[in-house]
Amino acid sequence: MSLVKVAKTALGKRILESREPKVVENPKSVLVMKGHRTSQIVIQALNNIQYALKKPFGIHFSRKNDIKPFESETPLEFLCEKNDTSLFAIGYHTKKHPNTITMGRLFDHHILDMVELSIEQFKTLEDFKVEKCAVGAKPSIIFVGELFEMNETYRHLKNFFLDYFRGKEVKVIDLTGLEHVIVFTATEANIFMRTYRPLLLKSGNKLPRVELEEMGPRFDFKVGRTKFAHEELMKRATRQPKETMKRKKKNIEFNALGEKYGRVYVDHQDLSKLQTRKVKALKKYLSKKEDGEEKQAKKQKMDVDSE
């Protein structure tokens, strides 16, 4: 039996209301923590994930936590619920799992999926002596490699990385303000993660020449243990609210160039009943036409009677 939390103060009431389900979700925050054993590489990697890739949406624990995600999920779920985070990253260094980071996400305060990534090569932000992007800049995420489409595990990883690093949702993006690009390249053995900053250079034309300058961090990951949600739970987690679904407008189409076309249905018109300007010449013409039609109808009737 689950206990229902009741606020005792106005501040507590506001906190509980902020954690209730919403039609439009808040930006997802990440809980970054160190495991029972760590290395300098793991600590630097966690700091880079927190401060470079997820800041300001994250909480960093300075103390070590004896938590093993693939063996016991309850302590991790408790800490994420307590700190109101739906993403987590925990780093540890052991003989079986050297320089490893486990990243995951939650749904309804329970772990939805997680993946274990072993760091084979790593360069920090400080190793790249270039200008960095602004804090909280929304990244453009690019996936390179057929495995992200053909392999089931890599397809889940693509969805996971998109949800993990996408940042705050926005309706419109100014391309001149795009300062952060994350590229994932997949091979059968590794996943290479590179972070770039776009540069707009002079090209002699109206459109600038775009180049990517690596600003770090740089990761070479090897995929270890994984835990992905089953199909029914994934459908529940990705269900789109009716309020946010766009209703399809009837009889409106777009061509390949994006031009909008509308289709209008008009009933069959009887031109004889069409209201026109009353001109004497037109009136005489219509009266003659009606007389001719009447005479023709009488003639046809007489022919039928004579037969």
Image: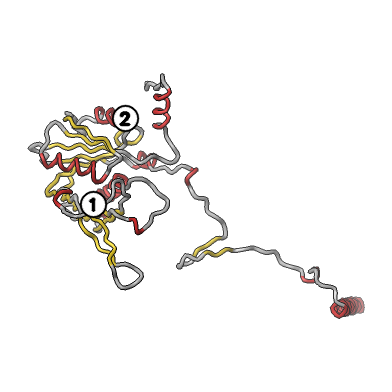
In the rendered view, tell whether residue 190 sits above or below residue 34: below
Locate residue 35, reporting x and y percent: 16, 33
294 or 252, which lies in front?
252
What crowding class fits label 2: few (fewer than 14 Cα within 10 Å), some (14-19), or many (20 or more)? some
In the rendered view, tell whether residue 242 sits above or below residue 79: below
Q: CA distance from mark 1 to mark 2?
A: 32 Å
Image check: 217 left or right of 79?
Answer: left
Q: Quadrant of residue 286?
A: bottom right
231 or 299, which lies in front?
231
Q: Pointer 1: what residue? A: 132
**Which label lies toward us, 1 or 2?**
1
Q: Amino acid at mark 1?
A: Lys
Q: Pointer 2: what residue? A: 81
Q: Quadrant of the N terminus?
A: top left
Q: How is the image coloured?
A: secondary structure
Total marks in image: 2
Precedes in sequence: disc 1 or disc 2? 2
Q: Amino acid at mark 2?
A: Glu
Q: Secondary structure at mark 2?
A: helix
Q: Is residue 307 something one can see in this rendering?
A: no
